[in-house]
Image: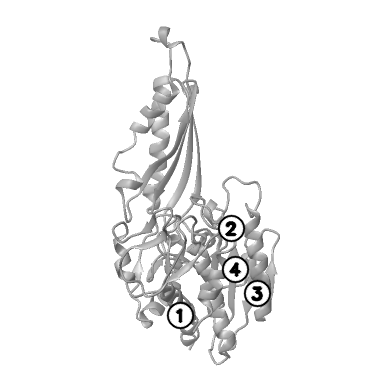
Amino acid sequence: MYSTLDRFLKYVTFDTQSAEDAPCVPSTPGQFELARYLEGELAQLGLKDVKLSENAYVTATLPGNTKKSVPSVGFIAHLDTAMELTGKGVAPHVVEKYDGGDIVLNESEGIVLSPRDFPFMEECRGLDLVVTDGNTLLGADNKAGIAEIVGAVDFMLQHPEFEHGDVKMAFTPDEEVGHGASLLDIESFGADFAYTLDGGPIGEACYENFNAAGATVHIKGRAVHPGKAKGLMLNAVVMGQELNSLFPADETPASTEGYEGYYHCLEFHGITEEATLKYIIRDHDSSKFEARKGFMRRAVRWMQDKYGEDRFSLSMKDQYFNMAEKLKGNMHIVDTMLDAMRELGIEPKIIPMRGGTDGSALSWRGLLTPNLFTGGYNYHGRFEFIPVQSMERATDMVLKILELNVRRAG
C-alpha cells in the first residue's frame, strides 16, 4: 500500500552515525550523503521548495490541495544514528510472520534476538520484523521516521483526492549528540506546528520530556609518596567518590521511572593528582529541576569547605527543557495526534519522555513539536528491530493527522 518499507530499507544502507564533540554540523559526512539522497528523492517526487542547507538540513513542501484555510503542519525526523554501535554495513532482512520464538541474527557469532531477553516480543507475534545481522544498529531511530513521512507524502501524490493543507517536512542532523535542530530556520520552514516521528513502539505519544542539565566537577588532589602520605596526600579519586556518595542512592537512572528525576554520574576518571566527574541532571518538574541543580551546587560547596575552595570546581549548563511548558494553552496540537491514533484503532500510550527530542528544543524556540511513535524497539543496540506493520501504521497516522487538520478547519 505504501512505499515506506522500500524507502526504509534503502535509507538504512547509509552510515549516518553521529560523533560527539565534533567541531562541525553535521558531525559526520555520512549524514550529508543521506541528505543529498533525500534532496534528490524529494525533488524527483515533485515537491516544492526542496532545499539542502550547508549543514545537511533537508526541507521541502507538499502544497495543500484544499480550499479551506488550514494550518501548515510539519513532520520532522533526524538523519543520524546513535553512537553505541556502528551503523556501517547495515544488512537488514525481514522475518515474515514472526512465530514468537528466537530469531537467529547471526548464527556464526551466536547472536540471537530472544523473547527470553525481551518479553515484549510476544506482542509482535504474527508481524513481519525488520532486523539486522546483529553486528550493527538497524537505524530505525530515526530512519523509520523519515521513511514514514516520505511514504505518506508519496501516497498523497499518488492520491490527489486526499484533501490536505500544506505539508512541511524537515530531516535534520545530529539529534543523537544533542544538536536540537538548532540550525533549522523555523520562519523559513513555515509550519504552524509540527510533529517529530522519533518515538518507540506503536501508540507511543509524548508531549512532555525532562528538563536537563549537564555538570562537570574537576578535583585537584595532592600526590605524595604513599609511604609518607599520612596527613599530606589528597587523593582526587577518593575525593570524587566522597562527592558522589553525597547524592541520593535511589535517585539514579537505574532506580527511577516515569516522572521521577535523577542524578547520573556518567563519567569518572582520574588519578591521585586530579579527577573529573561528569553528571547529567534530569527532572520533568521545573521547580524540582532547579532544586536538583541547587543540590549539586551545595554538594560541591560542602566538599570545598572540607578540602579547600581551590580543590573543587563546578561548571553546569542547562541542556534542554520540558516542551509541556510551551504546549500549555495549545493542547489542540496534542489532541489532534491522540485523536488520529484513536480513529485508527491505536490506543495512545502517553509517556513522559525520559530524555529529550528535537521537538523539545524546537518547542522552546517557538515551533510547537510533540513527538510520535515510529514503531521500533531496542533502539541504540544490536537487537534493534521494527515491525513492518508498525511503520505502515505510523504512515497512516501522518495521513490521519492531516485529515483531521482539514476536517476541524470547518
Does the rendering let one see residue 75?
no
Closer to the camera, 305 or 313? Answer: 313
Q: Mark 1 or mark 2, which has the lower sequence index?
A: 2
Q: Mark 4 or mark 1, which has the lower sequence index?
A: 4
Q: Which mark is residue 16?
A: 2
Residue at the outermost right position = 54
Query: Label 3 to label 1, Cα distance in Å?
Result: 21 Å
In the visual, does 283 lie left or right of 409?
left
Nearer mark to the viewer, of 2 and 4: 2
**Residue at 69% from the left image edge and 63% from the top image edge:** 53
Query: Label 3 to label 4, Cα distance in Å?
Result: 13 Å
Query: Label 2 to label 3, Cα distance in Å?
Result: 17 Å
Q: Which residue, given by chain and number where applicable, does mark 3 sit on?
A: 41
Q: Which mark is residue 170?
A: 4
Does the rendering let one see residue 297?
yes
Residue at the outermost bottom position = 161
Nearer mark to the viewer, of 3 and 4: 3
| Mark 1 surroundings within 10 Å by alpha-carbon count, few (fewer than 14), some (14 through 19), many (20 or more) | some
